[in-house]
Amino acid sequence: MAKSKTQYYCQNCGAQFPKWMGKCSNCGEWNTIAEEAVSKNEPDKPWRSQNDKNPVLFNIQDIPAGQETRIITQNQELNRVLGGGLVLGSVILLGGEPGIGKSTLLLQVALQFNDLKVLYVSGEESASQIKLRAERLGIETDSCFVLTETQTHKIFKKAKEIQPHLLIIDSVQTLQSQLVESSPGSVSQIRESTSELIHFAKETNVPVVLVGHITKEGSIAGPKVLEHMVDVVLQFEGERNHLYRLLRAQKNRFGSTAELGIFEMQGNGLREVSNPSEVLISAKDHTLSGNAIAATMEGIRPMLIEIQALVSTAVYGTPQRSTTGFDIKRLNMLLAVLEKRAGFQLGAKDVFLNITGGIRVDDPAIDLAVICAILSSYENQALPDNCCFAAEVGLSGEIRPVNRVEQRVLEAEKLGYDVIFISKYNKINPGDFQIRVELLGTVGDLYRLMF
């Protein structure tokens, strides 16, 4: 019988210690260090490399440059976030809140493969539960195989028999390796199980998708090294009480991390939202003050979003500043610009800002729309419903240019808007577009033109 020894690991960051300590010296958290049993005489690796030859040394100039081979899924939003599809041999980690739809998304992707075999491994649900979800999705296929197992060596045994083109693990916190004697979900188990899956993916060229739980702080549970080990880290976001889900890439070795995928949760699964503006702009019977439309970019994807502002007299001594989906510090900066450069007395006003649709935007190009929404609520005067904005606001009150302004203008033109306000320092010709392009230099120009 293999001898075992114990080590102490921080359950928050994965740091290793020779003895128990109250505070982790690596991440600074208290009471996160736990004792775990580690096998001393390791058994045979569940996935042993088939290539025992000497490693080959390459000069970087001699390595042929080529495009990665990808598997194109039937889900265009997932393809966009991944950078064009699943790269062969890649390991993808998908995290999100409980009940947000991670398992539904991956099962839907697995069932949509008709010509490729998919092995769906679940350590949290029974086969009958997965079948019920598949019936609810309404997709029939004979190329998806379901395995309810948590032991990694048994998973690899079935993978050798089936030879799948895609392996899905739901979830990595339920896996258990023979090499570690600690319980599933511990730092050492997650690290060792993920390491075995990475070796499997690189040796067989089979993409592996891992579902990861998250902590109450919103980060992926387990050691931080887990996110360093994998090739792609995806975050599935959204409110459980709202219909829309957002898929973002926090790390991507094969593409951009600025892309955004939008889904709508329905009774029969997740629907891809190809036109985000239909989600992010609410329909109104009549014009209301405090609403403005901004043309923003998520990666290379233009979209229009609606910004709502409410300015009211402060009831208490200290005015409130509250935002949803927007940086509170940037709101304070824009309010200071309005007060200093344009003369508006907003210091004694409560200001509330909201970006509709549950989306969070960090693009500085929405500054102009934020200011217009605030001024509209301040003056209690509605903006024309056929105009939108795309410009950054500087500390001196100037309207600054933004990148990819042509794509923003074309998106506004495609959605039927009549006028778009941008910076006069953008190098474009307004006559090249059917939509009217208004060029602004300062915040004062904006106020005189709109109000």
Image (cartoon, helix red, strand yellow):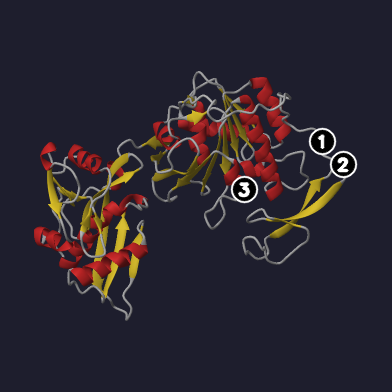
| Badge 3 amino acid | Val
Where residue 188 appears, x then y in whole percent? 71, 47
Circle 1 packing at 10 Å, graded few (<14), some (14-19), many (20+), is few
Looking at marks 2 and 1 on the same chain, the residue that comes earlier in the sequence is marked by 2
Side of 160 where 294 appears, left or right: left
The residue at which mark 1 appears reads as 43
Question: Are circles 2 and 1 on residues that touch, CB within 8 Å?
Answer: yes
Q: In which quarter of the image is the N terminus?
A: top right
Residue 65 seen in the current view? yes
Q: In which quarter of the image is residue 150?
A: top right
In the picture as drawn, the residue positioned furthest to the right comes out as 1
Circle 3 packing at 10 Å, graded few (<14), some (14-19), many (20+), is some
| Relative to 232, residue 451 above or below | below
CA distance for labels 3 and 1: 24 Å
Looking at marks 3 and 1 on the same chain, the residue that comes earlier in the sequence is marked by 1
| Badge 1 amino acid | Pro
Report helix, strand or loop for mark 1: loop
Where residue 72 appears, x then y in whole percent? 45, 26
Q: Who is closer to the viewer here, 383 or 224?
A: 224
Where residue 310 appears, x then y in whole percent? 25, 64
Looking at marks 2 and 3 on the same chain, the residue that comes earlier in the sequence is marked by 2
Residue 211's disc is: none
| Relative to 328, residue 317 above or below | below
Q: What residue lies at 70% left-to-right and 45% top-to-bottom? A: 189
CA distance for labels 2 and 1: 8 Å
| Relative to 445, residue 111 above or below | above
Where residue 372 appears, x then y in whole percent? 20, 59
The residue at which mark 2 appears reads as 2
How many numbered tags mark residues here? 3
CA distance for labels 2 and 3: 27 Å
| Badge 2 amino acid | Ala
Residue 225's disc is: 3
